[in-house]
Image (cartoon, rainbow, N blue to C red):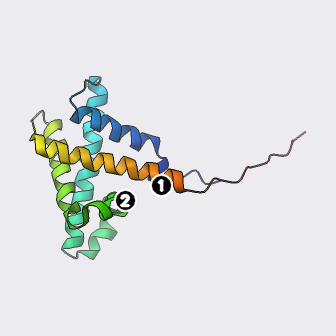
Amino acid sequence: MNLELTPAEDLSLQHLLENGLAILDQQSLHKTRRIQTLEGLSRIFSEADSASQALHAQNLLFGVEQRPALERFSLFFRRLDRYFGESLSDRLEEASDVFIKLKKNKKPTKGACKRARELIERLLSAFNEERSMSPLEAPQFFNSLG
């Protein structure tokens, strides 16, 4: 039995992204949840941004040394390249900056927040699409042990 979840099935990732949207919309979140959300999103976007920059610089060793960062970039690239194309790297860098600023209680520009919001919304939409397109698992039958 395989318990590894795809990003589209990972509810904690979905909730993190949804909490990020709430923060970008200036909705109030419990202080602890806000801190955890900003910490998580700044890490995800920073790692994806560094992997993107390394790939553009053709630093192939980066993929071996920084596998989590490469996986973060892959998360975005596989689902969002068709929407953003060449600007995806810039979007990741900008979103990273937005969440780092928010984490430091600094105010990013409205335009940057809007673009970070669009990135997250597109990712959540891609997850929904991915879940709806995946085949259903066959029913499992359990024999009585008695």
Element class at badge 2: helix
User: Can residue 24 be seen?
Assistant: yes
Q: Residue at x 19, y 42 (%)?
A: 99
Q: Amino acid at mark 2?
A: Arg
Find the residue positioned furthest to the right. Answer: 146
The quarter holding residue 110 reads top left
For disc 1, the marked residue is 130
Residue 16 higher or lower than 130, as above or below: above
Element class at badge 1: helix
Give percent across and percent down for residue 136.
63, 53
Residue 11 higher or lower than 28, as above or below: below
- Is 14 on the left or on the right of 133, as rendered? left
Viewer-closest of 24 and 125: 125
For disc 2, the marked residue is 79
In this rendering, the count of numbered labels is 2
**Other residues around mark 1 within 10 Å, as few (<14) / some (14–19) / many (≥20):** some
Q: Residue at x 29, y 23 (%)?
A: 30
Where does the C terminus fall, quadrant-wise?
A: top right
Give percent across and percent down for residue 129.
46, 52
Q: Amino acid at mark 1?
A: Glu
Give percent across and percent down for residue 69.
30, 59
- Is 145 on the left or on the right of 124, as rendered? right
Do the residues under discs 2 and 1 have CB atoms within 8 angstroms? yes
